[in-house]
Amino acid sequence: MRKMIIAGNWKMNKDIKETFEFLLPLKNNLIGQNLSVEVVVCPPFTSLFVAFEILKETGIKLGAQNMFYEVEGAFTGEISPKMLKSVKCEYVILGHSERRRYFGETDEFVNRKVKRAIEFDLKPIVCVGETLEERERGDTFKVLEKQVRGVLDGLTYDEMSKVVIAYEPVWAIGTGRNATPEQAQEAQKFIRELVAGLFNRDVALNLTIQYGGSVTPENAYSLLSQPDVDGALVGGASLKVDSFLKIIKAGETALIEKRN
Ligand code: PEP
């Protein structure tokens, strides 16, 4: 059975003090709750070690927001999969639209990172999604197909079992305008069918596909109860303990209903 994963992408937010101020109450709220959903927080690199210290033995998982595909060497400013493993990251977000837009990352570049992450036993959360212009042109599926094929190129079935896909329509990220549950379901069903064709039905059925883009406590349940929406990648609403907890709760409710 595939996992429901609620992940918080802090982006370039929270210093060490703010990391403590967020994670201590989060941990206190979730401890002993025996959740079925997987909760992941993705702080900036500078907070990963502190986050690891706070979160160990809590069941709350740690993710990074990016990494380079080389293991070590003269790559000023980059972080390697080996370094992420040393602070016990389990996940790494790759190909976020902000990386694609501001740092020129391509599907081919993201694909190299995906392969390297898996080699180091990190689970990549690979982001895909269309821009508003592409959606309005009627090109959503075409764009998603190109991105999904590109970022997953050359993966084995076994490697694919480590991958999480986040469908993040670019027009919904940080805009307060979320995709409707129907739009998310339509796109994510398309992605799952595409993966079934590229790999096989089992791989597709076990694949966690998150939705990301202006997820809030108010819209989380309706999105997460869609059959092909297996979690959320949350930006803005993951920065406050209260709203992140409500989204986790919405995921837990949706997951229990799906399993019944
Ligand atoms: C994101 O950062 O992946 C994201 C979806 O951001 P937001 O929830 O703020 O739209």
Image (cartoon, rainbow, N blue to C red):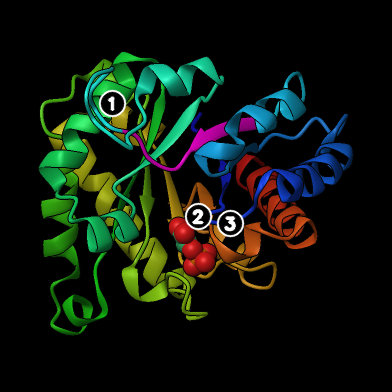
The quadrant in which the C terminus is found is top right
Q: Which residue is mark 2?
A: 11
Quadrant assignment, res 32: top right
Name above or below for residue 84 compared with residue 221: above
Q: Which mark is residue 160?
A: 1
* SS of the residue under disc 2: loop
Magenta segment range? Answer: 61-67
Position in image of residue 81 (x %, y %)? 36, 22
Mark 2 and 3 residues: CB-CB less than 8 Å, in contact?
yes
For marks 1 and 3, the one nearer the N-term is: 3
Position in image of residue 66 (x %, y %)? 38, 40
Q: Amino acid at mark 1?
A: Met
- Asked if one can make out residue 225 in the rendered structure from this viewpoint, the answer is no
Seen at 70% across and 50% down, the residue is 248
Quadrant assignment, res 87: top right
- Asked if one can make out residue 38 in the rendered structure from this viewpoint, the answer is yes
Mark 1 and 3 residues: CB-CB less than 8 Å, in contact?
no
Q: Which residue is mark 3?
A: 13
Name above or below for residue 3 compared with residue 185: above
* SS of the residue under disc 3: loop
Position in image of residue 210 (x %, y %)? 45, 50
